[in-house]
Amino acid sequence: MGAVVFISIGILFLLSIPLITSNMAKRVGRNPKLWFFIGLLLPVIATFILFLMPDKTEK
């Protein structure tokens, strides 16, 4: 039972960064689904790139 909990926590941790990236993409007017998958491939780098991109939302 301990291994299942350990693996579940690991999966949640690995998915947390792409979820943060997709949420950030939605706020700046980008496609959140696309950025979720980019965040899966390049977790920290995708968030950093998205942070540097200009905001596309209309104010």
Image (cartoon, rainbow, N blue to C red):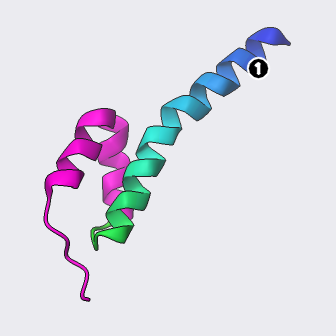
- Location of residue 17 by image quarter: top left
Q: Residue furthest bottom?
A: 59
- In this figure, which residue is indicated by the disc labeled 1? 5
The region drawn magenta spans 32-59
Q: Quadrant of residue 32?
A: bottom left
Q: Which quadrant is home to the N terminus?
A: top right
Which corner quadrant holds the C terminus? bottom left
Amino acid found under the numbered disc labelled 1: Val
Is residue 51 inside the magenta stretch?
yes
- Location of residue 11 in the rendering, given as x and y in whole percent from the top left corner: 58, 29
Extreme-front residue of the structure:
59
Residue 26 on image: x %, y %: 37, 68
Q: Is residue 19 visible?
A: yes
Dot 1, crowdedness within 10 Å: few (<14), some or many (≥20)?
few
Q: Is residue 42 visible?
A: no
- Relative side of 31 to 50, left or right: right
Residue 37 located left or right of residue 1: left
Question: Which quadrant holds residue 28?
Answer: bottom left
Relative vertical location of residue 33 with respect to residue 36 in this rendering, above or below:
below
41 vs 12, nearest the viewer:
12
Q: Residue at x 37, y 38 (%)?
A: 40
Q: Tell me if 52 is positioned left or right of 45 in this view.
A: left
Secondary structure mainly formed by the magenta segment: helix
The image shows residue 38 at horizontal and vertical percentages of 29, 45
Q: Residue furthest right?
A: 1
* Secondary structure type for disc 1: helix
